[in-house]
Amino acid sequence: MLTNSSDWNERKRTWRMLNSLHPAAIDLDRIHLVRERSPESLSRPEALEELLLELGLNDEGLDEFPPHLHPFCGTGLRIWQYPVQFSKYLAQLATLRIRSYLELGVRHGGSFVATVEILDRFFPLESAIGVDIIPSPSMVEYTSLNPRIKFCCLNTQSDDFSALIDRIEPIDLIFIDSHHEETQCRREFAAVRESSNMIAFHDVLNQNCPGVARVWDEVKTTGDYECFEYTAQYDGFGPYMGIGLAVRRERMPQ
């Protein structure tokens, strides 16, 4: 079978990159920091921003983080998000009565754990699934702490992923944060758009991920969603990261 050479080269680069990645253990003891907070506190972006620092940030791509955040990096849950963005996104989610959640690309698992624990304080989740092509020991450990949680080690471009979506649909919220390449991101959106009420994308403003931005721009033009962006930056950096949230209009609070 003939294969487009640019696609084939991109796949080979991706495979080499994936083979070099090894998830680090995260400190799941820190989930008590969420469970001891009141829902009122967890609904305020400024309180969530402080909490995210306590939960701990990732230390990969450290040059994208301003120096004042470095003491919080490489610890705890290793959340790979900008607190100034993620806090506002989570506060918005708290208003949307989410009962089922799917995250594509969990890396170490920290952003998944934080999202699940915070959502669970508002409307108890019936199910939450993390998907990654790389095994994640901490995600396996987390499933033992919460029987409603599952981790699936599979490729989002595979028939197994399509079968998973068929089994669990409809899904309230899906967060797309896997391989930040345009073709894969577009395929993931196409695979889940009819099965979800809300779809979020990470790195919609990241200068290193223009493909994700292009897909997000297309989502905004469909007319099917009310779209929100959480793209605040730290002075002198970026633009990096950025979260886009697309909510089907019928799911918006009246």
Image (cartoon, helix red, strand yellow):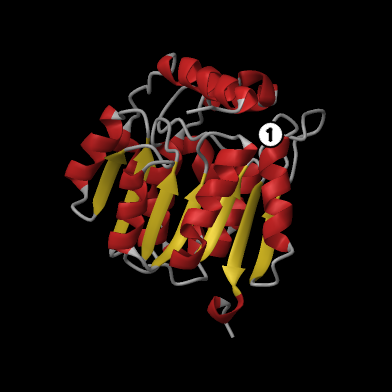
In the rendered image, residue 202, in percent from the top left (x then y), is placed at: 59, 44
In the rendered image, residue 153, in percent from the top left (x then y), is placed at: 30, 36
Mark yes or no: residue 47 visible.
no
Query: Is 146 on the left or on the right of 37, as rendered?
Result: left
Query: Is 243 on the left or on the right of 115, as rendered?
Result: right
Mark yes or no: residue 74 visible.
yes
Tell me if residue 148 comes above or below residue 21 in the rendering.
Answer: below
Name which residue lies at 66% across and 38% down. Answer: 241
Name which residue lies at 50% across and 44% down. Answer: 51
Tell me if residue 48 comes above or below residue 74 in the rendering.
Answer: below
Name which residue lies at 30% across and 28% down. Answer: 135
Which residue in the rendered view is the most extreme toward the bottom?
Answer: 254
Between 192 and 114, the residue placed more toward the observer is 192
Tell me if residue 201 comes above or below residue 72 in the rendering.
Answer: below
Between 77 and 126, the residue placed more toward the observer is 126
In the rendered image, residue 61, in percent from the top left (x then y), is placed at: 60, 21
Mark 1, secondary structure of its residue: loop
Local crowd at mark 1 within 10 Å, few (<14), some, or many (≥20)?
some
Q: Mark 1 points at which residue?
A: 209
